Image (cartoon, helix red, strand yellow):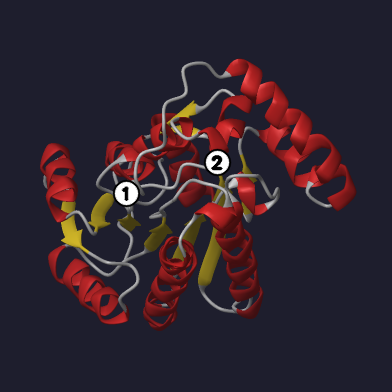
Amino acid sequence: MHAPRTDGAPPAHVVLITGAASGIGAATAREAVRRGHRVALADIDLAGATRIADELGPGARAFELDIRDEAAWEATLDAVEDQLAPVDVLVNNAGIIHTGYARELAPDRHRHMVEVNLLGPITGTLAALPRMRAQGHGHIVTVCSMTSFLPLPGYTTYGATKHGLRAFHHSVAIEERDGPVTFSIVHPPGTRTPMLEQEMADPSSVITFAEKPLTAEKVASVIVDAIEKKPVEVVHPAIGGRVQRAAGVFPRLMRFVIPKVVAMAQRRSTGLVPAPTAASEQGDTDR
């Protein structure tokens, strides 16, 4: 149960954040603890999550979690309840990307993104939802991507997973509209994380240079705001995000405009180096 506050601030929650060992997840954990929440940092990289949790003090705990594993979700939710309290807020943040044009990626790379970016959050949501219903409250926050609105070259399957994740999130929210669980989804733009560095090193992902990336700390602030204010959907930055969301409605417009944006990004980019070999990170979602 969320703890009452006497300082006029929103109630403190037990917040489970996936992909919390680095990037947006780690920054979100820091911001949540700063605002008085207790945080469970879950990641396949237990050592990394433990380093962050130790830095944050007694209000944080680290848990090893492969978000693709249904049994691991149940074990983690039990462990968080034992060590902190039942989870009030689940932040589905963990994600992965393999850069490259669709034809260049091996089938297992496409499958890996689908398993982590789409099936992982689906598994977590379905694990947390009955527990939240039983306790009479809960909030599921999905960290998605602006690529859920716009298909981009070099991000084919990544973008497809984000399109699917947004559809799943909103569909479950509609199904649960009369229940005690709240649903919010956040779409950050490019964010300065290790995942973004991988993208910037791959010429197929040159569109990364089309916009100035945000810091992980800025995105974390938006996510924790969503925990406390419970919006239905957040695009950030607000104006640019709304333009991209609107453009995604018109396929012919996308096919005309996006190649021009890619050309602009190519002019901005300098010193591209060969892409790393299937580098990956489950620690954050950066678009």
Q: Is residue 66 visible?
A: yes
The 10 Å Cα crowd at callout 2, few under 14, some 14 to 19, many 20 or more, is: many
Give the left or right position of residue 92, taking residue 12 as reference. right
Across and down, in percent, residue 269 comes to 56, 19
Q: Nearer the viewer, residue 181 or 77?
A: 77
Q: Say which amino acid is labelled 1.
A: Gly
Image height of 11 relative to 172, above or below? above
Q: Which mark is in front, 2 or 1?
A: 1
Image height of 158 relative to 202, above or below? below
Give the left or right position of residue 140, taking residue 251 as reference. left
Determine the residue positioned at 35% across, 72% down: 68
Across and down, in percent, residue 117 comes to 46, 61
Query: Which residue is the site of mark 1?
Result: 283
Q: Which mark is residue 188?
A: 2
Across and down, in percent, residue 91 comes to 41, 57
Q: Earlier in the sequence, mark 2 or mark 1?
A: 2
